[in-house]
Amino acid sequence: MERLETLPVEPLTAEEEVALVYLREEEKLARDVYTAFAEKWGSKIFTNIAGAEQRHMDLVGALLVRHEIKDPVVDDTAGVFSDP
């Protein structure tokens, strides 16, 4: 698999930019929910899923940086979002 840094930066459409911003917070929401489930029920499956959601969040964050798009996650506190 190629590393992101090795690929050319292609321009995004306005719709793609909006989708990335939305996806960043959607991944945060999923991470927050599965983290809360793991804390409540202590099940490793929820911890594993929360970890996967964090990786997704990190990858979308890298795309935002790469395309110089403002990151909507300004406060990483669980349950705190830019988009109400």
Image: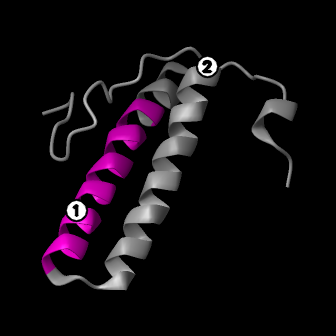
In what quadrant of the picture does the N terminus appear?
bottom right
Q: Position of residue 33 (x, y in %)?
A: 22, 62
Q: Main secondary structure of the magenta part?
A: helix
Q: Within the magenta stretch, is there residue 10?
A: no
Is residue 70 toward the left or the right of residue 81 in the image? right
Name the residue nearer the viewer: 51 or 68. Answer: 51
Within 10 Å of disc 2 (Cα), the crowding (few <14, some 14-19, many 20+) is: some
Q: CA distance from mark 1 to mark 2?
A: 28 Å
Is residue 35 toward the left or the right of residue 84 in the image? right
Name the residue nearer the viewer: 2 or 16. Answer: 2
Q: Say whether marks 1 and 2 touch (CB < 8 Å).
A: no
Stretch of the chain drawn in magenta: 20-40
What residue does disc 1 label?
Answer: 33
Badge 1 amino acid: Val
Q: Position of residue 17 (x, y in %)?
A: 49, 25
Badge 2 amino acid: His
Sequence-wise first label, 1 or 2: 1
Disc ID at residue 67: 2
Residue beneath the point at 33% across and 57% down: 31
Quadrant in the picture for residue 8: top right
Give above or below for 4 relative to 33.
Answer: above
Give above or below for 5 relative to 60.
Answer: above
